Image: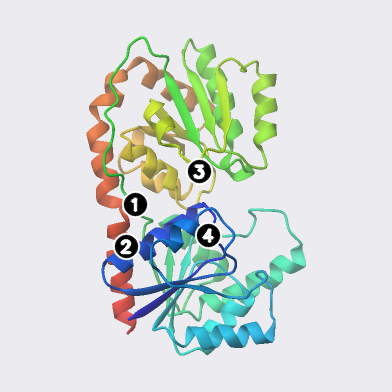
Amino acid sequence: MKILHCINNPHIGGIERLVIELAIEQKSKGLDVSIMLDTTKGQYYDYLEKQGIPILISGLKGGYDINYTTYQNLKSDFGNFAIVHLHNFSLARCFATLMATSKVVYTMHGLSKGVRQENKVKMFFRESIKKWLLNKVDVLVANSKYTLDLAKQHYKIRSSNSMVILNGIKLPSDVKNKKINEEQLFSIGLVSRFTNRKKIDRLVIAFKKFLEKGGKGKLTLVGDGDTFNQIKDLAISLKLEESVEMVGYQSDVQNYYNMFDVCVFPSQAEPFGLVAVEAYLHGIPVIAFEDSGGLREVVAPLEPENIVKNLEELAERLLFCSINPRYIMDNKRQRIEYAQKNFSVQRMEREYHTVYKSLV
């Protein structure tokens, strides 16, 4: 059974890392797996190349590239695979998969509508074609119930086979045991891209309220993006320069996770929430908002008390964690085991393998 995963590029992002690690796991299980990229530019390309997984180049110049020669080449390439597994949308790729003889699996990692500002005509055109495509693929997979429910509503999914397969990640070989240090300042952490949907302003404002309630601690923000300067200005305006550290993008965030006592991910309408899984793998409690979408599905089964409705509740929850260090340490092993059992790349590979076998 030959499988081809299609992604845009090998950047270090949520989708790209997920697909590459899935392909590596599939290869280790003896599957004949390849990856198709639109470009080799990206931080993960060298890592991917070392895995011995065949890499194909699509020739696409963007999601709206409809060059006929490229389309024909794609259709020819896809014909060599039993399963073509799509992870994002492009016009030529869409038509080529449906005209080829391969079975098509499409994983929806989130809805693009409303995520960024774009031309309304262009968006209408894309969403109309995407609606047609998603009702034609053999299996539609979503990374959370939240994402699948949105897709069914927005794209009016009827005829496609649809299901949820939760994301999985490569598990660390070991987890460092963090010891309680009563003299250490309570550490609140965030690892995130800085975009509007991440709602990092909610965390900064709630942290201010936490301090006003008598809480003592520091907030460390790891990441970069469009709203970085906006969040920096907010921290300055709230006079939090001494207690909020913004360290920017970091290629290795393990040392930061080992430093944090609690992680807060204030996102709204998040498709999944891989960062919450990473925090749990370090034994760290995670706090999220009720409107966080798929992120809530990761946190609520384990720590329903850490789902908050508003800034006031977030500040109160941070205060509770800061004065109850045993809550953090006593449940550390439970968090790690929860993440290992439910969100490993091995579990994800098994579930996708079942889908593939049902098609061929």
Q: Residue flagged by tag 2: what amino acid is it?
A: Glu
The residues tagged by marks 4 and 3 sit, at their Cα atoms, a distance apart of 30 Å
Marks 2 and 1: in contact by CB < 8 Å?
Answer: yes
In terms of depth relative to the viewer, which is nearer, 38 or 47?
A: 47
Q: Which disc number belongs to residue 25?
A: 2
First-in-chain label (4 vs 3): 4
Q: x, y percentage for residue 212?
A: 54, 12
Residue shown at the point (65%, 15%) measured from the top left: 239
The image position of residue 143, as x and y in percent, is 42, 59
Instruction: Decide if residue 198 is on the left or right side of residue 25.
Output: right
Which mark is first along the chain, 4 or 1? 4
Nearest the eye: 353 or 314:
353
The residue identified by callout 3 is: 291
Seen at 36% across and 9% down, the residue is 183
The Cα–Cα distance between marks 3 and 1, rounded to whole angstroms, is 27 Å
Quarter of the view holding residue 318: top left
The label number, if any, that marks residue 10 in the structure image = 4
The three-letter amino acid code for the residue at tag 1 is Lys
Secondary structure at badge 2 equals helix
Around disc 2, counting alpha carbons within 10 Å, would you say few (fewer than 14), some (14 to 19), or many (20 or more)? some
133 relative position to 24: left or right: right
Q: Give residue 170's mark.
A: 1
Q: Which mark is residue 294?
A: none
Q: Where's residue 284, x and y in %?
A: 35, 32
Q: Quadrant of the N terminus?
A: bottom left
Tag 1 or tag 3, which sits nearer the N-term? 1
| Circle nearer the N terminus (3, 2) | 2
Give the CA distance from mark 1 to mark 4: 17 Å
